[in-house]
Amino acid sequence: MREITTVGVIGLGTMGAGIVEVFAKAGLSVVGVDGTPELAERGRGFLEASTGRAVAKGRLSEEDQAAVLGRVTWSHRLTDLAGADLVVEAVPERMEIKRDIFTTLDGIVREDAILASNTSSLSLTEIAAATAQPQRVIGMHFFNPAPVLALVEVITTLLTDDEVTGAVRELAVRLGKKPVVVGDRAGFVANALLITYLARAIRMYETGHVSREDIDAAGKVGIGLPMGPLTLADLIGLDVVKEVCDVLYAATHEPSAAPPALLQQLVTVGRLGRKTGQGFYAYE
Ligand code: CAA
């Protein structure tokens, strides 16, 4: 079995920064890459803040925090991924950006390195087709917040090598996660289950017959989910929720998957949820 000891993470937003944290806490060496030195620095800031909160709560010692931070190097150059055994891409959900990155990575990483995408909505098959070696391309889809939620969807295409699937699955277990292996279909497993529920909650809110707080109370207190659907949509990011709706609707034509008008408008005006400070709710 191949050894995975050095990993690269491209894109250091909410998901990418969380994925860096998961790898570093599991003892792997990590290279975190984003497009500019400032964005790479922002990634470092996210990791310092998140591990700092854990120290403040007494869940992590200061020595362990220093060890986690010491395992990560930060860069704005993809060429710094030349030594990686595995690269996980977590940039915004734009097919052309992802395909460009995968094509470029082909010429940078070792022949035997694995190329993974954290895409939550795009076709992994289309991403893999942008590379010269699609057999080493796989999905590694984490859930937000990545340091807390244990599921990792391991997404395969018709061409993914079984050995690559096995290695990524084993790595997910090493990270303390529960891997589920799924073929390349719109929404994979979890989003295909979740997104129509979120869209339904947004439509309910649009009708005005029940407040956002009461919709969320019903989901949390009544159904027993960890948070209500509108709070969860804000956490995931309304742009991501809309993108998954679009992809599911295009694939299934099920009216329940169509993005609600309010969701589309919130995305258009840049109210994307927690990450922009405003979505269905306002955040500090
Ligand atoms: N990073 C690191 N740790 C975090 C965190 C973050 N962003 N957010 C919360 N935590 C930690 C807290 O520090 C806390 O740890 P301790 O118990 O050790 O102190 C723990 O998680 C619980 O947090 P809180 O006490 O603050 O709050 P909570 O009990 O309400 O849990 C939650 C918060 C983990 C977010 C929980 O509400 C939850 O699981 N919500 C559902 C989230 C969910 O369904 N996510 C999936 C979205 S779908 C997706 O991501 C896929 C996609 O493609 C769209």
Image: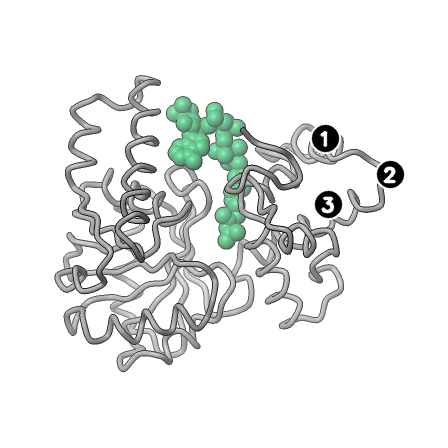
Image check: 182 left or right of 34? right
Place of residue 133 in the rendered image (x, y in percent of width and height, measured from the top left): 27, 79
Pinpoint residue 235: horizontal percent, then vertical percent: 54, 41
Q: Check residue 250 in the rendering and tell me which mark sits there, or answer none.
A: none
Left or right: 78 in relation to 154: left
Q: Amino acid at mark 3?
A: Ala
Dot 1 falls on a residue whose secondary structure is: helix
Mark carried by residue 213:
1
Name the foreground residue: 221 vs 126. 126
> Is the residue under label 2 in contact with that under label 3 (CB below 8 Å)?
no
Residue placed furthest toward the right: 209
Q: Which residue is mark 3?
A: 201
Q: Amino acid at mark 2?
A: His
Asked whether 269 or 44 is in front, the reply is 269
Closest to the observer, 282 or 243: 282
Q: CA distance from mark 2 to mark 1?
A: 12 Å
Please say if 64 is above or below 33.
Answer: above
Residue 1 visible here: no
| CB within 8 Å, label 2 to label 1 | no
